[in-house]
Structures are given as C-alpha cells and as structure tokens.
Amino acid sequence: VAFEIAFASWTALLHIAADDPEPRVLASEGGGGGYLGWAISELALELGRTPAILLFSILLLAGLILATGLRGRHLLRANVWLQGRVRAALDRLNTPPDDPRLTGPEQPDAGPLDRPDLPGGARIPYSRPSIVPRADGQTESPALPDRWTAPLRPPEPGADTSPGPDARRRGNGSGSGLSKSERAKLIADLRDSMGASNGRSLIAPGEPGERSSIVPRLPERDSRPVASVPADASPSEPGERFFTVEDFQDRKKIGERDPLLPPLDLLSDTELNKPTEEEVNTNARIIKNTLLDFDVEVEVIDVKVGPTVTQYAVSPYTESVSADGETVLNRVRVSQIANLNGDLALALSARRLRIQAPVPGHSYVGVEVPNRQPSTVALRPVIESEAYYRKRERPLALPLGRDVSGDPFVADLATMPHLLIAGTTGSGKSIMLAAMTASFVLNNAPERLKLVLLDPKMVELSRFNGLPHLLGPVETELDRIIEVLRWATREMDRRYKLLEQEAARNIEIYNRALGKRRQSEHLPYIVIIIDEIGDLMMQRPDETERALTRLAQMARAVGMHLMVATQRPSVDVITGLIKANFPARVSFAVASGVDSRVVLDYGGAESLMGRGDMLFLGPDAAGPRRLQGCYISDEEVNAVVEYWARWHEDALREGRAEPHSMPPWERGLTRREVLSETDPMLEEAIAVVIAEQEASASLIQRRLGLGYPRAARIMDLLHQLGIIGEATSGGRTREVLVKPGADPFKKIVDQRLGDKD
C-alpha cells in the first residue's frame, strides 16, 4: 500500500511538473504521469498548484519511508559510520610520508614483492596499476616493469640492523639489515635498470632527476569552465590531468517583451550534443604524447567544449627537477607547436584541425579538434541568453552564435558599423543572413527599423516579402539593384541635411532632440542586406564599388548599415577600397589560405568545418574568434513573416498603419527608363536650359558640343516633357517652364507611375 501511494504521488508530480495547457492530451501521448497522473492531479489542482505539489511531495516521502522501513536508528547508524570513515581519512592525510604504517601489510591496495636478488632479501611494496581507457572504448592495464621502485620498509623498532649471512642467504628478510651505503647503491641500481620511456622518467617521485609536469602559473580562464579536474579522479598516468565534461547550461534572462513583438515560441529549440569524457581525455593524452614524440614537451591545462569543436589549451611551460634538486622551467617555441598541425591531425584522425598560436590574451596555444557529433546552434536559446539581454535595448543586436566554450556570442552592428561576409557555397552565408534578418524583425517594430533586401540569387531572401519592415519588395534584377544603391546614397545625403538642421552628430542624438512630440519625424535605422555582390562586381564593377564605398564611409552616423555577402573572396570582388571600409568581417569555410587572408588578413578559415562554422573578426579584436553560427529553418522564417503579415492586416483595419507604398527608389528607376528611351544627353541639356532660363538649339550646340540635328531633337524632347514652351516666331529663344530646384521629370514620372498602378 505504501509503495502504491508513493507511485501514484510520483505520477501526479510528473504531470503537474509538465505544466501542459492540455493535460489530457499529454496523458494520451504518454507524457507526464500518464492517465493515472492526470486523474490524480486533476483532483488536487482544485486546491491550487503549490498546495498540490506540497501534498503529493509529502505523500511520496511518507510512502517511501513506510515501504523501505526506514527508521531513525538507521539514520543514526549511518551517521556514526560516516563519521568513522571521515576520521580514518583525516588520520591517513595527517600521517607523515615516512611513517612505517604506510608500508605495512594492512594497506588494502599494496602487497609485498619478494626480491631474493636484493641484499637482505628486501621486500618492496607496490601499488596496483591504473586502468587506462583506450580510444576504441576498451580498457587495458599498463605493462608492469621488471623491477619496482618504492621506499624500502624501515627496520622494526629495537630490531638488529646487522645484515647477517643467514638472512641474506634465505632472501626473505625484512630489509632492515641494509647499511646506508648499500641502501644508496640499491636505489642507484634500481634507477639505472628502469631507464625511461618516451621521455618520461620512471624514477620514484621525490628522487633527484624526477621530471614534473606541473605548470608554474596557470592562466585565468576567460569564460565558464566546462572541463575541470575533480579531486577523486584517477588519471591514467601519474601527474596527468583528468577532465570532466559538464552539460551546456546557459543563463537565461529574457525580460519583459513588447506585446507588439512576435513571441519567441515561433522559434524552435534544439539541445546541444557534448562529447564524452573518454573522447576529451583521450584526445588530450594523444596531443601531449604526439608532441612529446617530436621532443616538444607541453601540458594540456584546460579544455573548452563547444558545439562543433573542442579547444585544448596547450601550455608551452613545464617544470623539471634537475639532478641537483633545482627546479628548472622548460619552455618550447610556439612555432614548434604550430608546425605540427598535420601530425596532430593524423594522430587524432581529425578531418580538419586548427591551431591558434597563441590564443589572444592568454598564455597558451589552442588546439581546436572537431567533435565526433557536432551540434546545431538554434537561434532561440541565443536570444534568450543573458548576453543578448544585456544588449536588448540596441536595435541592431546580432546573435551570431556560440564560441568554442559554448557561450552565446552577441555583437552590435551599430558599432561595427558594416559587416562583410565571405565563404564558399554551402558554408552557411545565406542561413546566417536569414537568421540575422529574423532577429532584427523579432526585436524591432516597423517604425524603428527598416530593411532593404537585395538578392541577385533570387531565391534566398525572397521569402521575407510581406514584412512591414521592408521599404520595398526584395530586388533581384541587376539594374534595379544598382538604382537601389544610388537611392541609398541620396537618402544618406538627405539625412545628413536633417542632422545639420538639428545640430546632431548622429541619428540617436537627432531622434532624442525631436522628442516624443515629433515622434512621426523620427528617422528609423536602415539595414541594407546584399546576399551576393560577386555578380554585381562582375557586370557593373565601377558603379557597385562607388556606391558601396560611399555608403560604408559615411552612412554610419545617419543610421544606415550594410551587410554584404559573397562566395568569391578574391581581390577583384573584395577590392582594397571595399575591404578598408568594412572593418568587421566574417569568414566561413573557404577553399584556400589565400582566400582566408583576403577576407580576414589571417589564415585559418580554410580549416573550418563548414555548415555554420566561422571566424569573426571584430573591428577592435586582436584576432579572429571562432563561432558556430545560428541556424533558422524555413518553417521558423515563414512563421515570423506570417505573424507580421497578420499584424499589418489588423493594423490596417484599425487605422494604425498605412498600406504598402511605392518603394522610394521607384521614381529614380522610372527616370532612368525615360533617359534610356530618349537621349543620353537629355539630362545635361535640361540642366543647361534650367540654369540659363532660356532654350535654343544653338545654346545646346555650344554648351554640349553637339551637331544641329541632335540639338534640334533634344529641343523637341524638352517640349514633350513640358520643360520649355512653344516655338516663337523670329527664331527667338523659347521660355523655360521649370524653375531652378524643381524636378523636371516629375510630370512624366508621375504619369508612368500612374500607368503602372
């Protein structure tokens, strides 16, 4: 009966802990506590959630106590037994090393070994060998040496210390008959006979000539430790560290979200896979032994476990004790470790291995080994992390992913101020752009942030059509993309004039100066995202480079930022002028080290694993930082876009929003169409006649250096556009109908835009 009460209470607690909005459906699916837990929990939930949990916890505890027959005397006996074990352990710790009790037969893990060949038939105690895990998951015991080294058993108190021929002949003496000189000779013979293996001394600890692997000063860790050395760990070799792997535990801190913004439930969450302790310790031992085979003595002092790779901190500093008893600090060159990249990859059977020599800001070299089962970094946990919470007020916060320690990494596009992304096909560029676009619209209202999406590949960014954040539809045609970039430069100049009127040096000060009374005049941030500039630089290199360079140089202060991606990281695509104005760069996997240096000015991107594995170079960073980018699925993107589409429809019905207007660059496109259909010199002729406020064929001939037939045709075009009046008698100049500062194409552009509508 007690067991059944405990079992029923346990199922009820499981169902209450699930906290499912439909508990019956959860029970039918086999979740929580099943039908039994659902039925019992429904009876008690009428009292409230907290009283129900308290009631079932008391019933569970009482049922377990009654079922097991646990009584107070049992707890007292367990307490007495535990106190005895603690006292015994403290006594062993307080016993000096030369205490005769340490070599007595009462030790459970030691046993005597008869050595008839030693003087006096000395009996040498020894310890059982450790069990060594192998890379294939099996275990093996290390081979036992021919002779054992350990302190000799001291003589019994009051015993005769003379050697005695009978004791030597029998060979089963206690060893107490050894003189001081014979004892020293015995130790020297043992040391010479044991030798060394692979550079490791087999001499007993504490003897002269011992080699120690203790690092003098361990560097401070810069992040949450995910691998540590427990006190009760049993390393496979003396002096070797044993690392334990902890689960990935993020500090979640979401805060109160604006009810206007989409809920984070639209995004999915995936668990991260962590490597096993056996894999981590085996790799650490292989790294140390492989370097030692090449006479590079190092020590693995720390392990950082990430979603894709595990970084092993290799310290080039070790200590050794000389024959005179002095401590000597050994140091190896960093270049010696870096040059053994291929040998380490061969020993570890790694597809690609990257050595960061040294890690910026630390006194160790990072060896980054791919995990056997890499993890997928979801976007939602990074947005829910404490790192993103600290930057939640910034409209351009970028949740880039997780670093080699598994910690979320969040940057700010406003401080970069532009981002250049490069990588081969399939390395993760488009997914990163989709994830960053989704993060922008998840945390910003349409009046705070506007997006301009340019997608020459035509398929990657088109799924964001319908967002109220877009200034216009996603542009895919080359000529229209060039015109959008021209419009962006004109918009930048317009914003600078507005900032000049308010004496503001950037967009934040400008919006703050306007205040809440002029909320409608606030300038939103504009992010221009280009998925592939390789095609633009191939067909229209001059116009593309001129527009990108001008925006990158000046657009930061007015709140306009660029995110540009390319799969061709060559010097003809990423020119020196573009590269100089994009201090923040991201490189995914590239084909060669030359491409890596073109993007980052550093090598290493050719050793990345692909599928979101990237190197991020910040504008003020000492070197690139390895990250695993966030992944977002098509279903998540569609859910976010549908949410904002429904919101826009509701806002239109309630009068809180305006319908999608014409893109601001459409007038410029129509003007270009008019010029391409007429005469390329028409725009210059219009500027001449408006400036002179008179028009004649001879004036156009003189100013533009044209022949009379072409000048006469331009005069007819000016009349058709409504810029000049009718011809007058006597060959006099015609009247100019457009005043200086007005748009001469306004009439025809409005007419064509009306026809399109």
Image (tube, rainbow, N blue to C red):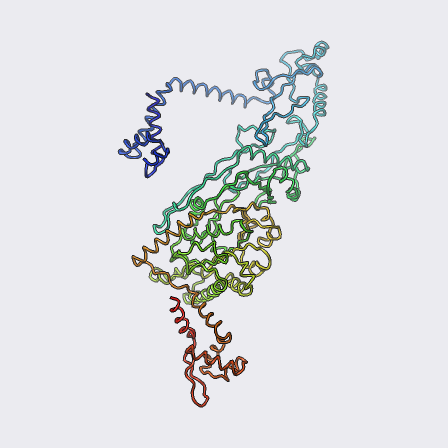
The vertical placement of 70 against 542, above or below, is above
Q: Residue 92, located in which quarter of the rendered image?
A: top right
Query: Along the horizontal axis of the image, is 547 left or right of 18?
Result: right
| Residue 455: x %, y % from top left | 48, 57
Q: Is residue 203 above or below residue 458?
A: above
Q: Residue furthest top?
A: 166
Is residue 418 visible to us here?
A: no
In the image: residue 635, left or right of residue 573 = left
The C terminus appears in which quarter of the rendering? bottom left
Q: Is residue 375 visible?
A: yes
Frontmost residue, 457 versus 296: 457
Residue sitting farthest toward the bottom: 730
Which of the two residues, 730 or 127, is positioned nearer the viewer here? 730
Q: Quadrant of the N terminus?
A: top left
Q: Residue 679: x percent and y percent?
A: 50, 75
Q: Position of residue 440 (x, y in %)?
A: 43, 53
Residue lying at 41% horizontally and 80% vertically, measured from the top left: 737
Labels in figure, total: 0
Residue 318: quadrant of the picture: top right
- For this rendering, which residue is in front, 676 or 389? 676
Left/right placement of residue 646 relative to residue 595 reads left
